[in-house]
Image (cartoon, rainbow, N blue to C red):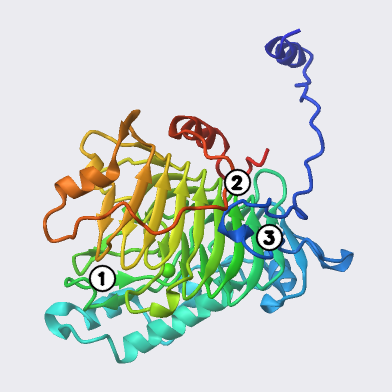
Amino acid sequence: MRPLQVALAGLMLGVLSVPAQAEARDIGRDTLPANDGWAAYGSGTTGGAAADADHVFTVTDRAGLVRALDGGSDTPKIIRIAGTIDANTDDDGDPLDCADYATGGYALKKYLAAYDPRTWGSAKPGGPQEEARQASAARQAERVVLPVGSNTTLVGLGDSAVLKGASLQIKDADNVIVRNLDLRDAYDCFPVWQPNTGGLGDWKTAYDNIWLTGATHVWVDHVTLSDKGHPDAKEPTHFARTYLRHDGLLDITNGSDLVTVSWSRFAGHDKAMLIGNGDTATSDRGRLRVTLHHNAFESVVQRAPRVRFGQVHVYNNRYDITGDDHRYSLGVSTESRIYAENNAFHAPGHVEVADLVKSWNGSALHQSGTVFNGFPVDLLSIHNAYNSGSERDLTADVGWTPALHGPVDSARAADRAVARGAGAGRIP
Ligand code: CA
């Protein structure tokens, strides 16, 4: 019988037969394949593969996860997340909301009244409401910031593992793997008003779903990163700026190096991925080497990625641009050397090829094999033809050619493969 007939027969018998499935393969001891991007450089990336039996954990709640992470220790360990873990919970597993964290008399209404630019001006917020905000934010950070140490593998078990509300922070650590996890809604209860950001002031939020700072040899694979649960598009405007609740989905900063991000989904978010967070951070020179391949960037407004300093190989990614708020996809900033090849872009009519690249103080971009709405395009010549004159033209010579990578597919083949295979729950 054909599968449909089998299912119908099962229904008629009152028992829906489920096809026998092979027991899910244990991915906990997988290591990054040889040559698979910058994280394969030198000693490669093995995460917690060397863990002994006492350091293989299956966790189902925040308390168990925190115990297994062991304060970011470098003991080889494999941590498997089963089901959904909410970082905004107390030690008994009971949910905590923003009101539970608020302390010292903090209230958004009072905060807005205190620092209204019309009365407060453009000085940095200070005084009782800002102090109360900081104290409240510290209480949330204590729950949601989860440090991941060296020699750690963190994986989802099965195809529906979720970690919500958390900010995984890989800080000054080496050799870390994060795979097969849906990481969502790193929601900041207490954004800070920064009157001097971008001329008009802006709200600054604290948490990235994953933040690499001083981290080396990191492989992020088959991860889904989003704001699911609290889309920023539904947030109100305060002081004429959107009251954003989320920072980056995956930010790579402060001398981080040798990172591969593969087969992951970045979805429904403003600032997806920042590689290098300051034009004056010259210690990032020669570092921030990152490979991005077979990732899906869906409904992302900007930073897919934005790069300073790094040699970043961006190949075989799929971009699905939706909505009215897209600003750019590839951000070319100070001393960045992006090597982009065989990427596929899908965009609605009001988005033009010239909107895909933005340069701030950048000088070079390699691009080849780009496909836009099914047609081959040259991002570089179009960027240079349309740039406003306030930017320098970008040259094609980025001074390096990627050597560490798997097979590079055509943009069209990668487009289909990524649509089918990127994200958590999709490891073949
Ligand atoms: Ca960030």
Q: Quadrant of residue 164?
A: bottom right
Of badges 1 and 3, the one in the foreground is 3
Q: Is residue 142 above or below residue 55?
A: below
Question: How much space separates mark 1 and mark 3, taking CA atoms?
Answer: 34 Å
Residue 202's tag is: 1
Left/right placement of residue 371 relative to residue 124 reads right
Q: Residue at x 27, y 35 (%)?
A: 348
- The residue labelled by disc 3 is 154
Disc 1 marks which amino acid?
Asp
Disc 3 marks which amino acid?
Leu
Q: Indicate the position of residue 403 as horizontal and vertical percent values.
A: 54, 52
Q: Are marks 1 and 3 in contact (CB under 8 Å)?
A: no
Q: SS at mark 1?
A: strand
Of labels 1 and 2, earlier in sequence is 1
Q: Residue at x 53, y 68 (%)?
A: 257
Question: Which class describes the residues within 10 Å of circle 1: few (<14), some (14-19), or many (20+)?
Answer: many
Q: Indicate the position of residue 211 as horizontal and vertical percent values.
A: 51, 68
Of labels 1 and 3, earlier in sequence is 3
Of labels 3 and 2, earlier in sequence is 3
Residue 424's tag is: 2
Question: Which class describes the residues within 10 Å of circle 2: few (<14), some (14-19), or many (20+)?
Answer: many
Question: How much space separates mark 3 and mark 2, taking CA atoms?
Answer: 13 Å
Left/right placement of residue 400 relative to residue 379 reads right
Instruction: Give the quarter of the figure containing the C terminus.
Output: top right
Q: Which residue is outermost to the bottom?
A: 127
